[in-house]
Image (spheres, helix red, strand yellow):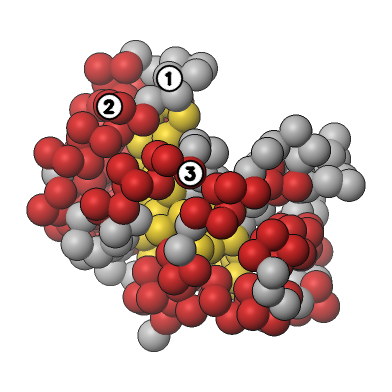
Amino acid sequence: MIIDSHCHLYDERLSGKTDEIIGGLKEEGIESVFEVGYDLESSKHAVELSNKFSQVFAIVGTHPHDAKNFDEESEKFYKRVASLDKVIAIGEIGLDYYYDLSPRDIQKEVFARQIDIACEVGLPIVLHIRDAYKDALDILTAKKDKLGAGVLLHCYSSSAEMIKQFDKFNCYYALGGAITFKNAKKDDVILAIPDDRLLVETDCPYMTPVPFRGQPNEPKYINYVIDKIASVKNLTREQVIEITNTNTKRLFSKYGH
């Protein structure tokens, strides 16, 4: 049974289908899904979903796009719910200079603050980094003593060489549907990620894998991610599932126990 380490079932593109999707997880070979917040409202919804469904676990935090809206209320909520059994990480947090939907100085400030929060509550962090690797590495370096609970690069999209830069923080790397794209050229990245640091995700409803590009992504399509990794690494599906599940449970220790 597969663990989808990153999804957004709250997204409007899946509106009205959430219960149906979660109800069909077992049939699709999925053990559980991690519902990830990107602001206060979506983080509250993630917690609600985790309370409603045994297969759903929550990750709470403010995305760099929404950094301009991070406030004291958000911080208090993230800290308060961090004690709940099914809230397993702070995320997705980080930097995104591709869209710049929040000013870069605010993105950096909010990123650093949420690392502090994660350290305070003893949870790992889930990172969204796009076109901002240097500044992200600088912030992680400055906060290295606060990363003890673990770091995951969600939807890892940089190079095999960049993995060496993140290895100093003992990072984990999650791969999703993008590795199936015909122009992705990600085989070297798949091979460069150590087996004991690899996770899988859908990021649904985004990053829908081939052959379903153009449609909203769903957790069931994670099977195509598993198949791609198995092909590139010359492993069986069962081996990839065992490896990624073991890593997911190690990183998200509250889930593992």
Picture disc at residue 97: 1
- Quick one: 44 or 238, which is closer to the camera? 238
> Residue at the spot x=59%, y=81% of the render?
242
Q: Is residue 235 above or below residue 128?
A: below
> Residue at the spot x=23%, y=46% of the render?
115
Q: Residue furthest bottom?
A: 257
Q: Give, as a three-letter code, the residue at label 1.
A: Tyr
| Direction from residue 82 to residue 195 in the image, left or right | right
Q: Give, as a three-letter code, the residue at label 3.
A: Ala
Q: Where is residue 216 drawn, in percent x and y?
A: 79, 42
- Quick one: 131 or 102, which is closer to the camera? 131
- Quick one: 230 or 66, which is closer to the camera? 230
Asked if disc 1 and disc 2 are in contact, CB closer than 8 Å, the reply is yes
- Quick one: 17 or 218, which is closer to the camera? 218
| Direction from residue 69 to residue 123 in the image, left or right | left
Which image quarter is the C terminus in? Answer: bottom left
The answer to which image quadrant residue 106 occupies is: top left
N-terminal of the two: label 3 or label 2? 2
Q: Is residue 143 visible?
A: yes
SS category of the residue bearing label 3: helix
